[in-house]
Image: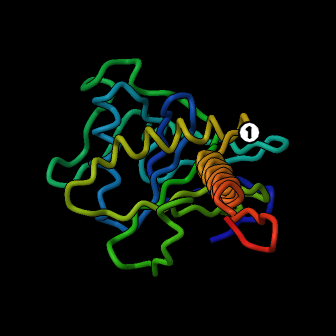
């Protein structure tokens, strides 16, 4: 849902701070957001808010915070309410964060594949309080390490902000290689072209 006004907004999901990036884990109820948040916490990242983070706009940036009553708590299926600060230490909780990236956890086969995903991934954007926020869609499949994928998505966003896009880099390399092969083939054809000799014969 696009939110295009400047009033405070509440979005459903888990807001985390991963490698300095504020990332909101979204998806249907029961898809595994809290379990993914716990895995990220064990890897040293920080919880900002579970379930209902509150967002406000400041200039061109979106900032999220946890309602004071829920600060430091996380609901995990089968375990109930957990006190993250007591489980993982005081540095595991952060009071607020910018919203830099949305990670949408998808059930398998909910989105049609075109083949381009292998090059550019499943990317899009969502408008939050009038600001376009990058969004990455990650299908949940058996054997996927979702925490590693979220970490990689956050690191990749840092590179993209600096102007580097891995898919564009690979495409340029492929074009250079195709051009090199064409030049090599043309040079080879020129070397083996028959030479004309006296009398019109070729050698």
Quarter placement of the N terminus = bottom right
**Residue at coordinates 34% horizontally, 71% vertically from top-left?**
107
Percent position (x, y) of residue 184? 65, 52
Direction top: furthest residue: 90
Q: How is the image coloured?
A: rainbow
Residue 130 found in image quarter = bottom right
Point out the residue furthest to the right here. Answer: 59
Q: Which of 121 and 192 is in front in this view?
A: 192
Task: From the viewer's side, name the closer residue of 145 and 85.
Answer: 145
**Quadrant of image for the C terminus:** bottom right
Residue 147, given in percent of the width and then of the height, sits at 34, 42
Question: Can you say whether 139 is above or below 16 in the image?
Answer: below
Q: Which residue lies furthest to the front in this view?
A: 199
Tell me if 118 is positioned left or right of 89 in this view: right
> Residue at the spot x=49%, y=59% of the render?
12
Q: Tell me if 8 is positioned left or right of 42 in this view.
A: right
Query: Residue 104: x, y in percent?
Result: 47, 61
Q: Is residue 201 left or right of residue 20?
A: right
Is residue 17 visible to us here? Answer: yes
Q: Disc 1 marks which residue?
A: 163
**Which residue lies at the image location 39% right of the left edge and 25% below the top edge?**
92
Specify few, some or many for label 1: CA neighbours under 10 Å numbering under 14, 14-19, or 20 or more: few
Image point (58%, 39%), residue name = 65
Q: In this view, does 183 lie to the left or right of 95?
A: right
**Foreground of the two, 44 or 47:** 44
The count of marks equals 1
Q: Can residue 171 be seen in this view?
A: no
- For the residue labelled by badge 1, is the local secondary structure a helix, a strand or a loop? loop
């Amino acid at each position: 849902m696009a939110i295009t006004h400047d009033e405070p907004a509440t979005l459903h999901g888990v807001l985390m701070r991963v490698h300095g990036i504020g990332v909101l884990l979204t998806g249907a109820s029961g898809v595994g957001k809290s379990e993914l948040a716990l895995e990220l916490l064990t890897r040293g990242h920080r919880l900002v808010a579970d379930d209902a983070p509150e967002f406000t706009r400041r200039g061109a940036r979106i900032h999220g915070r946890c309602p004071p009553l829920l600060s430091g708590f996380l609901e995990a299926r089968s375990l109930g309410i957990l006190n993250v600060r007591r489980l993982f230490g005081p540095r595991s909780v952060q009071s607020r964060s910018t919203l830099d990236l949305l990670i949408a956890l998808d059930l398998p086969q909910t989105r049609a594949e075109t083949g381009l995903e292998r090059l550019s991934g499943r990317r899009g954007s969502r408008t939050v309080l009038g600001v376009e926020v990058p969004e990455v869609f990650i299908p949940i499949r058996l054997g996927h390490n979702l925490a590693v994928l979220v970490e990689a998505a956050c690191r990749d966003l840092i590179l993209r902000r600096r102007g580097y896009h891995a898919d564009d880099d690979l495409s340029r390399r492929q074009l250079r290689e195709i051009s090199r092969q064409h030049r090599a083939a043309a040079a080879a054809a020129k070397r083996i072209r028959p030479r004309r000799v006296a009398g019109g014969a070729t050698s």
